[in-house]
Amino acid sequence: MRSSNPVFSRRGFSRDNGYAGFNAAPQAGGPAVGTQGNPYAQQGGNPYAQNPYAQQGLQQGAPPQAPVTTGRMTMDDVVMRSAMTLGTVVVGAVLAWALLPVSSTSYGLAIGSGLVAFVLAMVQSFKRTATPALIIGYAAFEGVFLGVISEMYNTQWNGAPFQAVLGTMAVTGATLLVYKAGWIRVTARYARIGLTIAIAFVAVMAVNLLLVVFGVAPDGGLRSSGPLGAIVGILAILIGAFFLTLDFKQIEDGITYGAPKEEAWLAAFGLTMTLVWIYVEMLRLVAIFSGRD
């Protein structure tokens, strides 16, 4: 089972098409970390490939601890790269809001920026290594796109972007709390069911978009401003929260098993895409609940 997020499934966050945390959790008395359990054991330079605990007099089955050599991903690395990537999105959005007044020209720039961001995201997703320039470039163009559409929504529904930001923060914080409390266990079955729902949702939304473009559903179809649109928006946000749990699990496993430091860029990239998803859906939901077309 691959990740919902392509930037994780291309690298050490998955192993034999499965999540490291699902198939490779170290068991007491089991094999040493880095033999069967460590998804990074096959990568060169992995400090766990040769049991780092052996020289410390610890047993082979000892639980994983912080890597004893440099060059491994840490939570600080993930936080710092995420701050850089999200910060670039915010700066791009603020500049676009301030410098591009709502007009047909700005709409065109928003669509163009969104397409460029999509292309950069796809290029990075299919690369086997992280390219910081691609990731920052994606964040910059994504920021321009978000800045224009946020200004557009704010023009029609005053304060909608601010409420969407608060909603995104609330969803992220609640998801992290639930994940860390153990109320959600990210298992293979959980991921399989969630990914099936997510893929089905994207497919239905693609069909709905075609119906709108060709005039079959001029009122927006499933994306209308009525109760049905609100239900679809809530489902989309829940899917975004599901993506967050997979991101949290994969980052946690990457740190536990000594992922290379450059994986922090991929972690930041994946989190940024998920948060953008949640923000856009939250923006739509706020507009619907405003009660004004």
Image (spheres, grey):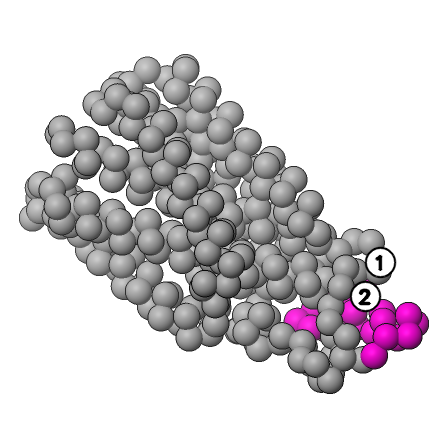
Residue displayed at 70% across by 52% down:
74
Q: Residue 124, how many percent across, how many down?
A: 54, 50
Residue 47 tag number? 2
Q: Is residue 96 visible?
A: yes
The foreground one among 135 and 158 is 158
The secondary structure making up most of the magenta span is: loop
Q: Which residues are magenta?
A: 38-59
Secondary structure at numbered mark 1: loop
Q: Residue 115, how many percent across, how many down?
A: 38, 40
| Residue 283 sits in quarter | top left
Residue displayed at 76% across by 64% down:
65
In space, the residues marked 1 and 2 are separated at their CA atoms by 6 Å
Figure disc tally: 2
| The C terminus: image quadrant | top left
Secondary structure at numbered mark 2: loop
Residue displayed at 67% across by 80% down:
27
Q: Residue 284, how many percent across, how many down?
A: 26, 38
Label 2 Cα crowd, 10 Å radius (few <14 / some 14-19 / many 20+) = many
Task: Judge from the rendering whether residue 284 lies leftward or rightward of residue 33; answer left or right.
Answer: left
The foreground one among 111 and 203 is 203
Contact? badges 1 and 2 (CB < 8 Å): yes
Task: Judge from the rendering whether residue 231 lies leftward or rightward of residue 15; answer left or right.
Answer: left
N-terminal of the two: label 1 or label 2? 2
Residue denoted by label 1: 69
